[in-house]
Amino acid sequence: MNSLTELERPIETDYLNCIRCGLCLAVCPTYRESYKEASSPRGRVALARKGLDGELELSPNLYEQMYGCFACMACNDICPVGIKPAELSLAMRHVQEQKEPSGWKKTLFENLIPHPWRMEAATWPLRIYQNLGIRRLVYALGLMRIMPSQLRDMEAMLPRLPQRPLRQVLPTVTPAKGETKRKVGFFLGCAQSLLFAEESAATVRVLSRNGCEVTTPDEVVCCGMPAHGYGRLDLVREHAKHNIAVFEKSDLETVVTDCATCGSTLKEYGEYLKDDPEWAERAEKFSSKVRDISEYLTEIPLEKPKGRVEARVTYHDPCHLRRAQKVWKQPREILNLIDGLEFVELPESDWCCGSAGSQLITHYETSLQVLARKMDNLAGTKAQIVASGCPGCQMQLNTGIQKHGLGVRVVHPITLLDEAYKE
Ligand code: SF4
Ligand code: SF4
């Protein structure tokens, strides 16, 4: 086991300057459910500080508070002295992984997630479950009712899986419809390819319709966010180098993604690799080209759709889009472009939905409590559709909507634009 001083760890300014003002408590979803100081941003900063200064053992309990953080970044935004408790929680997970590497994380994050073919093979049982009538049978026989509630909720998260992952279907180059006005790269995220293929197919159609030739390299690997969430910053850097090199093969002005989490991670590659002499400049250049799809579409002349989508719609801000990328006006602008849509603001639209990637699995009760708050707000809008540009949020919203019997459709905003283009 390495000593703390030999490890990559937060620098003192990341935690020493906390003035304990408590402003962050009001915006923290985990604190607002538990009202426990240890589950608050201020508490996590204090724990990290004492642990790193040797006043407190770096125990499983201490790390548990770091994993209990939803990394929603609300605290980062409100802190008056620039502390970033969300980043500190992630950095502490990285400290733990360096001190005591975990076997299951090695298997998952080294041997499965960075290998698209293995990920695709791993989802085949789910495809069989959904497509061969097994799911229908499970529901018809009432078997779902006798399953543990967490398993039921995880099952409810799943969208209808595509017959084949989009990575295997989408051509490397999709030509522009009509004259080619721009050449863009498309970063197809794992969740989009495996679970939300129709949404990303719609994204590429929309880009093509708006004069973009779209290059979608199939050699990209996971953006790195799942590994980052579990303390494997070393792997994030490996993924970053691989993905940068893939896109360097094509001379593209912009790299677009329709996954909020992927976008926020790709935009951070420059930061992750800033101390690597060979990669710092390349990473910075790559990150500067990355755009969320809604951000990009509002930067170019966008064709107004002639068709209509008749529905009352609201919008949930993914943390990785609103906080990490400061993109929140653009999806609303796109929704407001579509005739027939009646847009209504979701109260607390930027409050975390409780997903945070895997919190429904790892911190089930808190995740559900945070989700219930979102569902109360959603029910109040009386919307028929809730749009959101993050696959994790979409899955979490699906679970909440089924659990609370709301009957609201969950969709990516660009899918609605694509529908309106069909007239
Ligand atoms: S807002 Fe910032 S300074 Fe105030 S308690 Fe929270 S982390 Fe500390
Ligand atoms: S990132 Fe979110 S959940 Fe984590 S401490 Fe900050 S406000 Fe709380």
Image (cartoon, rainbow, N blue to C red):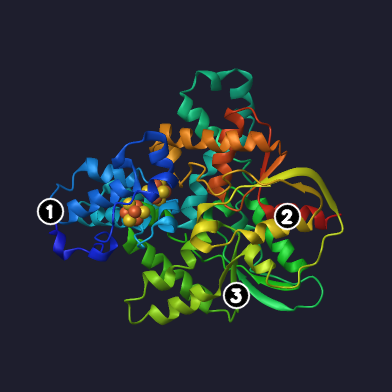
Q: Residue at x 66, y 65 (%)?
A: 171
Whether residue 161 can be seen here: yes
How far, Cα to Cα, is label 3 from label 2?
23 Å
Q: Residue at x 55, y 22 (%)?
A: 144
Q: Return the disc, 3 or 1, that comes first in the chain's sequence.
A: 1
How far, Cα to Cα, is label 3 from label 1?
46 Å
**Residue 211: x %, y % from top left:** 76, 73
The answer to whether the residues at label 3 and label 2 have Cβ atoms under 8 Å apart is: no
Q: Is 74 left or right of 56, judged from the image as shown?
A: right
Q: Is 285 left or right of 202, judged from the image as shown?
A: left
Q: Return the disc, 3 or 2, that comes first in the chain's sequence.
A: 3
Q: Nearer the viewer, residue 74 or 166?
A: 74
Whether the residue under disc 3 has CB within 8 Å of ligand 2: no
Which quarter of the picture shows residue 204? bottom right
Q: Residues within 10 Å of mark 2 (few under 14, many from 20)?
A: many
Residue at label 2? 335
Residue at label 3? 254
Residue at label 1? 54
Q: Residue at x 72, y 45 (%)?
A: 313
Q: Amino acid at mark 3?
A: Thr
Q: Amino acid at mark 1?
A: Gly
Q: Secondary structure at mark 2?
A: helix
Q: Return the disc, 1 or 2, that comes first in the chain's sequence.
A: 1
